[in-house]
Image (cartoon, rainbow, N blue to C red):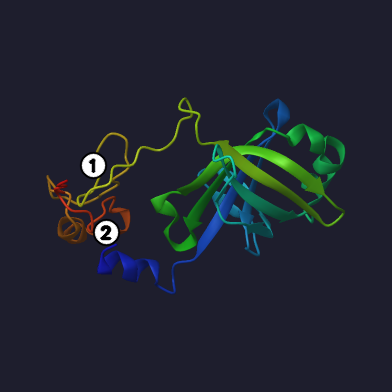
Amino acid sequence: MSPELEAVTKSAEIMPRMLLTIYAANGVIFRFVANDNQDLAFEGNTYISVEIKRGEIKTTVEGDKEQVSLTMSNRWQQWAAYIANNGTTLKYKKCVIQEVYLDHLEEGPVWLFEGILNSLKTTIAEFSCVVERDTVDFSQEGPNMDYGPTCQFIYKGADNRCRSTSSLPTCDGTVSACTERGNITRFGGHPSTPNQMVIRS
């Protein structure tokens, strides 16, 4: 990570918040924002404020799955009522975990984890589960990530992953070029990765 980007991410003004989206049965979608004292309007949807604790990503003993534990408060009445009446139907439903920076919502969400709900438990006060995904399911879609010293995003590309608003016509994808264009927070490269690696045996 470049010194410029590291300074931005450590800035006191930047406040990350976890977003949790649960795709329940019959087209019902629940959206929550973690560790905040008010709901969040984001990308046309309302995320309900609720206390959520997330564990670290772990791999099963067999090595075929990755898992993340979640514990969430039942204080929101609509969610508590749904859990009471339909909680068992949430098993194997899709769950997406993302993160946003409240002072930079225009940058969009950062994808953290996606999988299905399992090991559901509920009490009068909280709901807990494990979100898991197969690591051997090659048909599962995921974000493409290239590891190199220059930015992986196409400058002002049609997929809008770059999101640069600079008037400069081209960019060579380096850290200095992204800084010059005021787009360092969207830099998608890994400057510590060497351009070439020679392996001798």
Image coordinates of residue 169 in percent, x first then y, are 12, 45
102 with respect to 131 (left or right) = left
Res 124 → quadrant: bottom right
| Residue placed under numbered mark 2 in the picture | 184
Name above or below for residue 48 compared with residue 28. below
Q: Quadrant of the N terminus?
A: bottom left
Instruction: Give the CA distance from mark 2 to mark 1.
Output: 14 Å
Q: Which of labels 2 and 1 is toward the front?
A: 2
Image coordinates of residue 127 in percent, x first then y, are 77, 50
Task: Please tell me how crowded label 1 is: few (under 14), some (14-19), or many (20+) other residues with Cα within 10 Å.
Answer: some
Residue at left 59%, top 54%?
A: 40
Task: Please tell me how crowded label 2 is: few (under 14), some (14-19), or many (20+) other residues with Cα within 10 Å.
Answer: some
- Which is nearer the eye, 187 or 113? 113
Res 30 → quadrant: top right
Q: Amino acid at mark 2?
A: Ile
Name above or below for residue 82 compared with residue 70. above
Residue at left 39%, top 52%?
A: 107
Give the numbered dot on residue 98.
none
Query: What secondary structure is marked by label 2?
Result: helix
| Residue placed under numbered mark 1 in the picture | 156
Q: Amino acid at mark 1?
A: Lys
Image coordinates of residue 45 in percent, x first then y, are 58, 43
